[in-house]
């Protein structure tokens, strides 16, 4: 029971860190795009690249927690086709975050809770980035159409 309580606490910290970092990245991208006179293609590539980096950072946060709980707190490990490298934890974090869940690497014990939380957090952040992209593109198109009409 104590292990699950610790993993629950770590899950809350991971959600807070990943979501806060993601929010700050989107705020930065929004300000950058609003203040950039560049063409729309360049701004779109910049935005998508920035969002990708934000997702990668969130995935990395979860991978560090998996690694730390396993190697430093002595909690249950990953099982399946596993090599004891940080890249295995990063790979598992990618598949959990994206809800892909390939199944060749899977958590055992209390790490299952963190994996479920990561999947929910990943789903929220992925849909948030889709909504953000939609609204930025809408603003670009509105500005482009207004400029073409001479308003």
Image (cartoon, grey):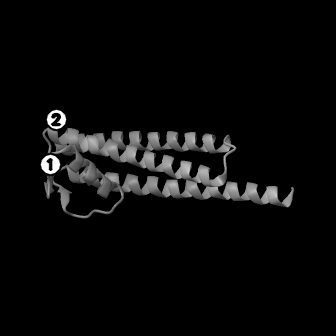
- What percent of the width, then of the height, locates residue 61? 33, 42
Q: Which quadrant would residue 119 be assigned to in this image?
A: bottom left
* Crowd class of label 2 (few under 14; some 14 to 19; many from 20; radius 10 Å): few
Sequence-wise, the earlier of marks 1 and 2 is: 2
Viewer-closest of 106 and 104: 104
Q: Is residue 130 left or right of residue 97?
A: right
Q: Residue at x 50, y 46 (%)?
A: 50
Q: Is residue 99 left or right of residue 129?
A: left
- What percent of the width, then of the height, locates residue 90? 27, 48
* Crowd class of label 1 (few under 14; some 14 to 19; many from 20; radius 10 Å): many
Viewer-closest of 12 and 148: 148
CB within 8 Å, label 1 to label 2: no
Pick out the residue farthest to the right: 150
Pick out the residue farthest to the top: 72
- Label 1 sits on a secondary structure element that is loop
The quadrant of the rendering that contains the N terminus is top left
- What percent of the width, then of the height, locates residue 42? 60, 50
Q: CA distance from mark 1 to mark 2?
A: 11 Å
Q: Look at the image and tell me whether residue 111 can be seen.
A: yes
How many badges with numbers are in the image?
2
- Label 2 sits on a secondary structure element that is loop
- Give me the disc on residue 72: 2
Q: Residue at x 44, y 45 (%)?
A: 54
The quadrant of the rendering that contains the C terminus is bottom right
- Give me the disc on residue 111: none
Q: Residue at x 44, y 44 (%)?
A: 19
Q: Look at the image and tell me whether residue 5 can be seen.
A: no
Q: Residue at x 14, y 54 (%)?
A: 82
Q: Is residue 133 left or right of residue 75?
A: right
Q: Which quadrant would residue 99 be assigned to in this image?
A: bottom left
Q: Is residue 2 left or right of residue 116?
A: left
- Give me the disc on residue 77: 1
């Amino acid at each position: 029971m104590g292990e699950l309580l610790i993993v629950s606490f770590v899950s809350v910290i991971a959600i807070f860190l990943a979501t806060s970092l993601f929010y700050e990245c989107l705020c930065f991208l929004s300000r950058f795009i609003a203040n950039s006179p560049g063409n729309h293609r360049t701004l779109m590539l910049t935005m998508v690249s920035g969002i990708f980096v934000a997702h990668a950072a969130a995935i990395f946060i979860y991978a560090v927690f998996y690694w730390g709980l396993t190697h430093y707190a002595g909690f249950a490990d990953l099982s399946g086709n596993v090599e004891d490298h940080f890249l295995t934890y990063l790979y598992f974090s990618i598949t959990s975050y994206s809800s892909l869940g390939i199944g060749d690497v899977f958590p055992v014990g209390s790490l299952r809770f963190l994996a479920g939380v990561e999947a929910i957090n990943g789903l929220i952040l992925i849909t948030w980035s889709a909504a953000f992209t939609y609204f930025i593109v809408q603003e670009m198109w509105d500005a482009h159409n207004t400029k073409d009409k001479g308003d």
